[in-house]
Image (cartoon, helix red, strand yellow):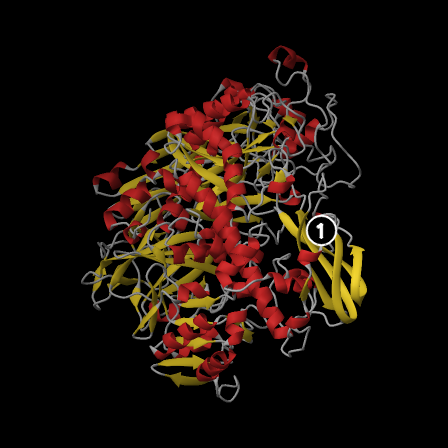
Amino acid sequence: MKTSPIITRLLPAALRILSAFLISALQPFSLSALFSASADLESGFASPPLSARPLGWWHWANGNVTKEGIDADLEAMKRAGMGGVQMFDVEIYMPPGPVRYGTENWFDHVTHAIRKADALGLEFHLMNTPGWSASGGPWVTEALSMKRVVWTETDTAGGEISLALPRPDTKPFYAARTVAKAKNGFYQDIAVFAVPVTGERLAAPLDRKIAWASKPVTRPVADRPGIPAARVIDLTAHMDAAGKLAATLPPGEWTLLRFGFVSTGKTNHPAVPEGHGLEIDKLDADAVAFQFERAVLPLIRKAGPLAGKTFTGLLFDSFEGGFQNWTAKLPEAFAKQKGYDFLPWLPLLTGRIIESEAASEAVLWDFRHVIEEMLAENYFGTMHRLAARHGIKLYSESQGGPLNPMSANRHVDVPMNEFWTPELSGRASRIKQSVSSASFLGRRVVAAEAFTSTPEFGKFQNTPASLKRVGDQAFALGLNRFAFHSWTHQPVTDAAPGFALGRYGVHFGRLNTWWPYADAWIAYLARSQFLLQQGRIAADICLLVDEDLGYGLPASASTLAPGHDYEVCYPADLHQMTVRGGVVSHPLAGDFRLLLTPGKTIAKTWVTTLPTLRQLRKLVADGAVLAGEPPSAPAGLDDLKNKAEFDRLVAEIWGGLDGKKNTSKKLGTGTVFAGRKPAQILAALKLARDVAWSPENAAVEFLHRATPDAEIYFISSQSAAPASLELEFRQRDRVPELWDAATGARAGATLFRQTENGIALPVAFEPWGSVFVVFRKPLPSRWATAVEPAAVSVTQTVAGLLSREPVEAVRYSDGTRAATGESASLPPAQTLAAPWRVTFPDGRGAPSRELVFEKLVSWPEHPDIGVKYYSGTAVYKTTFVVTADSSQRSAGMAGMSLRSEPARDSRDIADRNVRAPVTTVAPSVAVAPVAVPTPHQRAFLDLGAVADIARVYVNGRDAGILWKPPFRADITALLQPGENTLEIHVANRWINRLIGDEAIDDGLSYQDTGGKNKFTDGRIQKLPDWLYDPAKRGGRKRHSFSVWKHYNADSPLVPAGLLGPVTLEWLNHITPGATP
């Protein structure tokens, strides 16, 4: 592999020094709330607070709930290190259980859960509605529900007219497939207009322009004339309640437009029948308050003093409530916000052009903007104010549908987004919107619905190791508190794996086979989330977003300039920015070196308001650097009326730039660029990458957060293979520290160097590896930069350097050299080849007796059918002998030799007919004495391949949980001279047992329509009688129970167990002592 020039400069000569960090082997608002002092940083990393611990989306499935299950679920969460739950009551295609929503029995169970959470020190949050979207229930009448504009068109000749205008029906011409018809025919008139018959229509797509879709809205470049405003005749006063119109029209051909509004018919979902009903009107604050009173307040009252103490969160899942574009108070709100009457412009909603296409588009922009503001203020704002009275915070995935994350998140305490497995790159820029909104609002925590899985990636396939890569991607985008999707409530303990959220989500929970070992992974998440909640994101680019973009930021914007992060800002954010020395500063979000307009980057054209344009000009004149295309048109009608000033400002900012020959210009003390990529502009500004890596084609993602005391970098290798990289940080005069979230260990780096752009250090990443690099402390007088001889391969850990070969000397930054006095080499790694005694304590069809594996094999390859289909934990045991060399010890050198022996237990000769495939037992292996220079040597146990997670005990002492490759542990402190015992607990996934049980007829019936219904195929059609009756469970034939059929009897089995080879490796350990 070709070595980069950067590494060449750091590690001269042979370039064979693998000088690196082996990551997993290492053991109300105020700005001050964003930051933690250095000491707090250390203590919080060592013991993350509740606010940094992941939550669980706790789905109660159609009344299948028990208090025993509640207690067991919450206790398991607490043991694993989680922070609490966000509780949902959902139907999700399950047969009904006994605890029905809204009954006293239901309240009794929920308050029991709150009290239990309080006793355990866990948070309890409630989804604001039955189901997971959005806010509704059976108490919502059509008059209180979401509403849409409807109309009829009737052609007539001028003169005196007298006719009955047909009443619009409840089926719109747009989005009809997603909107249910209103049950009772609710309808109210808005107005009646006569317009000349004309064929001129607004440019498509109309559905976006009348607030019925979330994709970006584009405007035509050319203007076209339309119906003069004077020719739009208001006939509202001439129609009676029955719809009869009597009026006189001027000569000509006219179209009569009768406008009204109806319920969208949209309902909350997937709710149980007792909680299912229409969605509340999101634009009506009084209606929203009524929804809060019916869906949330009763539980707050029953929670008593625990509301605001333990019951601390109200959740809003991603918005799937559909679109609404009317409410009775909209005309009043429009006039208040925009200063003119919208009703004469109502014919725009039919697609007709009024006055001109430019004027029509501007009015429709105002219309959409008013709806956006009403949705934010009347829905989220009302819910926030009401919840805050009781000390409850709003958590919201302010995304999807018509939501603008920035507008909605003004009224949200903890913004959220979501990501799915196995890949989130398609959502990266959308996550950035939520993260950025938090930055500009001063919100420190950005939570996430985490690891949601579609059926093909669910089905018990995931483990902590398989989830790490996508989780680290989410961290690098700025998400910093995960809520696991999904922890489905398990009402019965001995019916595993039990309930699930249909076909979706990773099956987190206490009945998952690997859950007893999940605490190590959760500790990794908690430590990471704590660091990622500190300070604020440090980004170089501020990407201005067109308000009309909605939630449509494309994925292509996720990487604007490699090595430079970006944040998304909205026009309102610009008005809080100031410029000093070419740096654009926001009081909450931080500092930026480049402002970027949305043209071409994220949309073909963009529009903006006159105040925004004025502020852009001021920022540039004050010294800001601006890049991107100019806006194509004024946004709203008031902006259009001042088009002369708008055009003058555009000319002042962008005039003379063609993006080809003329790509930059000065304006005041600032600069405007056109036609150049962000990376080119930043290079021209001589701004080095915040993080650079070599080789440059490595798959690296990062996030930089800054506090007054520390610069915190999260670095993730998105490679399935080990990667040796050099990282260069735009930092000076501080020691790079390695903080290992997997173990909690931290220390200053041993090998690094100062460069023209900052500080560079080599890092070796495991598959999907990650590390925090923290800069806090000043540089010492000297530090190590290389080792001798250069051909020696070394690995750097938080404790120092590890090497299989002698390291003779260390070179320092001041040019000095220090000899280590090392002379001894180490023997090669040794394989533990003795037979293994294996037990299967979980039963589930496996033999109850101890088996002997003379060779490590995957369980599906074992001849015993119980082992073949086993899912659960198996315990592997063996012994090995370590002998000390007294002569070396007396000379101050630790020496040991390794001899592996077969297990000496009478049980290992029993039942040989069910052993794994037999091979000749390796004889005891005598190893030459191992000598390691002072101060000591290190011994590492490597399990080789593991399916899927392991816990290791040496001499009865815990060596840790190994949840990701390489499955490797430092066992130096656990070894003893003489015989050593080794015990390895290995858990696989549920897959094999579920497949094996499909050959056993247990009378269970699952839906199968041959794929006609992808949402419900596989669901259990009737719960077994024994589920809630322990006395009837004795007759069960299967070893598992699942409410969903994920596999068939002929589905392929997956590897399981300890696959090895298991090796013991000894390494030299050198501590230069160069850094504090």
Q: Describe residue 874's horizontal placement relative to residue 586 as left or right.
A: right
Q: Which residue type carries mark 1? A: Asp
Q: Is residue 280 visible?
A: yes
Position of residue 1028 in the picture relative to residue 443 (left or right)? right
Q: Residue furthest top?
A: 1031
Which residue is pictured at 52% across the width and 26% down the height?
Answer: 837
**Residue that mark 1 sits on:** 240
Mark count: 1
Q: Based on the displayed image, in which of its 4 quarters is residue 367 positioned?
A: bottom right
- Residue 559, relative to residue 746: is it above or below? below
Q: Residues within 10 Å of mark 1 (few under 14, many from 20)?
A: few
Horizontal and vertical percent for residue 691? 39, 65
SS category of the residue bearing label 1: loop
Look at the image and tell me whether residue 940 can be seen. Answer: no
Is residue 697 placed above or below 1063 in the rendered structure? below
Q: In this rendered view, identify the residue nearer to me: 194 or 824.
A: 194
- Say which quadrant the C terminus sits in: bottom left
Placement of 272 over or under 632, stated as above or below? above
| Spot occupied by residue 453 in the image (x, y as percentages of width and height) | 60, 44
Determine whether, in the image, residue 15 is placed left or right of residue 737. Answer: right
Q: Residue at x 38, y 66 (%)?
A: 575
For this orientation, the residue located farthest to the left is 781
Looking at the picture, tell me which residue is in the foreground, 326 or 260. Answer: 260
Which residue is at 29% across, 37% downward? 885
Image location of residue 794, percent across then percent down: 36, 56
Q: Position of residue 972 (x, y in %)?
A: 34, 39
Q: Is residue 54 left or right of residue 507?
A: left
| Residue 751 location, quadrant | bottom left
